[in-house]
Image (spheres, rainbow, N blue to C red):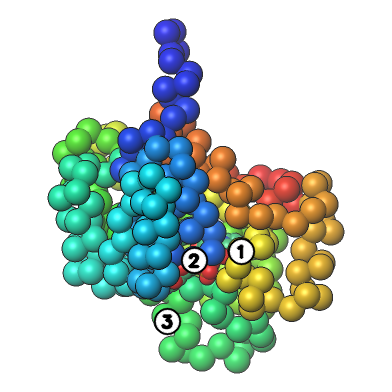
Amino acid sequence: MVGMDVNAACSVRDKVVIVTGGGTGIGKVYSERLAQAGARVVLADIADDAAQAVARSIRGSGGQALAFPTDVTDPQAVQVMVEGAIAAWGRIDALINNASLMSVLPRGEWFRIPLEEWDRVMEVNLKGMFICCRAVYPHMKAQGGGRIVNISSSRIWAGNPNRLHYTTSKAGVIGLTRALAREVGDDGIGVNAITPGFTESETQMATSSSNYVAGRARDRCFKRPQFPDDLVGAVFFLISDASAFITGQTLNVDGGQAMH
Ligand SMILES: NC(=O)c1ccc[n+]([C@@H]2O[C@H](COP(=O)([O-])OP(=O)(O)OC[C@H]3O[C@@H](n4cnc5c(N)ncnc54)[C@H](O)[C@@H]3O)[C@@H](O)[C@H]2O)c1
């Protein structure tokens, strides 16, 4: 691209970015880093106390953040959150679909998963993503474009066992990403996915045995733990203008465990 301003293209400054599940874990780190880089961050988490605390802390450090109590499976709550973002900042540049049922799920044999738990995982991890995409769509369309980043999991490449419902839902995220990218390409909206490897978020660590954690880095090219900050660059890239011609793709971030 002749005459491209590389610094501007890579910047997230002033972008209005919704982070679902932004109150804890990796989503909290996305929110903090985005705010540090000058983005205006909307935290949408069912754990509203946590999200409000993150937003307050960002504002206390001179950043811009708002939190709205949001269950992503509740279309009305999602609508209120999106309208709140529009009322505050007038546009939505990016949606990071990060909320999910993951760390709260027990690991175990697939045939013991209760049907209600299976349904709730699909509801949050897939239907919730659909509801959030649908809610931002009219605004992104009206403003001539936007970026959607869907958080999947590197589990889908190897087919990791022990959370069959979770792995299945995260594979569904890739189908949603690809088909939605085709649906909204003419509106200038880019839709991509990230597949993180096992990441030592506070929530993941609180629910994983030290034995399980110790084995995670073994098959990586980079044999060290993966931290939330290892995912930040991929998110920044996919919401910035630097990735403007990339859509329908999946970026694997796992230290080179899976090769995609
Ligand atoms: N940590 C890992 O090892 C890892 C690996 C691969 C993918 N991921 C994915 O990365 C994302 C973040 O992971 P994490 O480790 O922070 O997980 P997590 O389980 O700690 O965080 C999920 C967040 O989503 C929120 N949430 C749950 N249900 C919600 C709902 N109905 N509405 C709104 N918010 C809801 C939670 O409150 C929490 O803040 C998730 O999508 C997860 O599946 C994580």
Residue with the mark numbered 1: 201
Secondary structure under the numbered disc 1 in the rendered image = loop
Which amino acid, by three-letter code, is at mark 3?
Answer: Asp
Picture coordinates of residue 34 (x, y %)? 45, 44
In percent of the image, x 39 and y 52: which residue is there?
60
Q: Which residue is mark 3?
A: 119
For the residue with label 3, is its CB less than 8 Å from the closest atom of ligand 1? no
Quarter that holds the N terminus = top left
- At 74% from the left and 78% from the top, the residue drawn is 209
Question: In the image, is 244 to the left or to the right of 154?
Answer: left
Density class for disc 1 (Cα within 10 Å; few <14, some 14-19, many ≥20) is: some
> Given this view, does label 2 or label 3 mark the residue nearer the observer?
2
Q: Nearer the viewer, residue 181 or 11?
A: 11
Q: Earlier in the sequence, mark 2 or mark 3?
A: 2
Find residue 200 and report its image quarter: bottom right
Q: Position of residue 109 (x, y in %)?
A: 67, 86
Res 258 visible: no
Q: Is residue 165 visible?
A: yes
Q: Which residue is mark 2?
A: 24
The answer to whether mark 2 and mark 1 are in CB contact below 8 A is yes
